[in-house]
Amino acid sequence: MPLTDIKVRTAKPQDKSYKLSDSGGLFLLINVTGAKYWRLKYRYEGKEKLLAIGVYPSISLAEAREKRDQAKKQLVNGVDPNNFKKASKQAIKTAVEGSFEFVAREWHLKNCQRWSPNHGGLVMRRLESYIFPWLGTCQIAEIVPAQLLDVLRRIEYKGALETAHRVHQICGQVFRYAVATGRASRDPTGDLRGALPPTKVKHYASIIEPVKIGELLRVINGYEGFLVTKGALRLAPLVFVRPGELRKAEWSEIDLDKAEWIISAEKMKMRQLHLIPLSKQALAILKELYPVTGAGKYVFPSVLTNKRPMSDNTINAALKRLGYDSKEITGHGFRAMARTLLDEVLGFRPDIIEHQLAHAVKDPLGRAYNRTSHLQVRREMMQKWADYLDEVAKGS
């Protein structure tokens, strides 16, 4: 006798699992725990088989009967319902794992270990904001240049041309990863070269005229604000690291005896350990600061608590207080200052300068420089740079 909704709903568990038969091989299995499972008994190629249809009440009696009828049609056509179910699951799995979003997230996971947290987060936010809503579910192997260009132009038309170029680069890396992992045959981003208008190169504001540098250094030396901020201002041009690397400096990273500052890979943009040889002038600043902040973690702690580093705007705010706005010089601008004058005035090799700036540099054989590459030359460079800054500060 066929089942009814009431009989299915009121069926109670017993000491052993038992079945309530419906019709056409469909039955409800009631587990000792009270769980209820729809099953279909059928024969295929002379063998008795079971098809799991679903769990009650997620699958109602009427829905279970529909699935039974679908399975019966498959049998009439010579198809095993279990094989069809497995094939359908595999097709869904293949479609999901071949989607742009799946591949992009996998690529991001593979690469984020070598990126700084800020950079990794920015890459994912750009994908989630600009690409996934339109191309996320598309099969990556089927995306054509015109589709991608349409998405990139959405960004361009919002007035974010530089972001459009960045997203284009990110997508190219994702497509190349898909090719490498066998989920796409080519990278369509190459066909879009020149499709977006070029961006104007933006440089961080900096001062590179010796006379003006001297003026800046004298103003910094006269800073009357927080002692820790003054120390950061004085040290910034000597070590020319990125502002985030400077403000997050920890005493555990600095060896005053060896005159070295080693920044861990996790803090670096390129995710590689970085060594900064410390000049006599830089050591003097750090030794002045040690009695003030040496008992804590950070060399330049926040004004509010020594458990956090100074804020990311402290240096720029201090420079503004000294009369220099962001159009003249920023904390990042000390890097351009050093890069320009170390090359054009002091005559050091560009690759040595770039390495000290923690940029990706390779030797003539294509090998990446490590933290100790050309260390002696870099020590000499950092000391000559500090001496040069002393001279321009004197106005000579």
Image: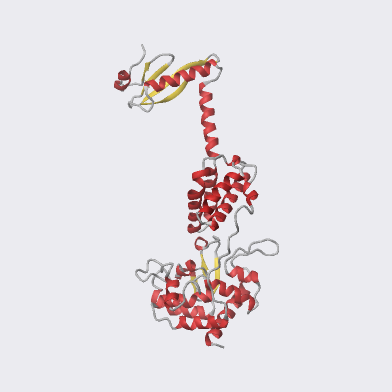
Q: Specify the quadrant that holds the C terminus.
A: bottom right
Q: Nearer the viewer, residue 7 or 62?
A: 62
Residue found at the far top of this picture: 1
**Coordinates of residue 46 in the picture (x, y in percent):** 54, 13
Residue drawn at x 50%, y 78% is: 283
| Res 299 seen here | no
With 340 as the anchor, is 364 left or right in this view?
Answer: right
Figure quadrant of the N terminus: top left
Q: Is residue 177 above or below residue 79?
A: below
Residue 319: percent from the left, percent from the top?
45, 75
Q: Is residue 23 visible?
A: yes
Which one is in front, 92 or 219?
219
The answer to whether residue 259 is above or below residue 16 is below
- Residue 17 left/right relative to 384: left
Q: How many marks?
A: 0
Examine the image and state in which quarter residue 389 appears: bottom right
Between 72 and 282, the one lying in front of the other is 72
- Residue 376 position within the rendered picture, expressed as x and y whole percent measured from the top left: 62, 74
Location of residue 214 in the rendering, given as x and y in whole percent from the top left corner = 53, 83
Query: What residue do we see at 49% from left, 67% from top?
Result: 245
Is 217 drawn above or below residue 90 in the view shown?
below
Snapshot colouring: secondary structure
Query: Which residue in the rendered view is the most extreme toward the front?
Result: 157
The residue shown at (53%, 76%) is 238
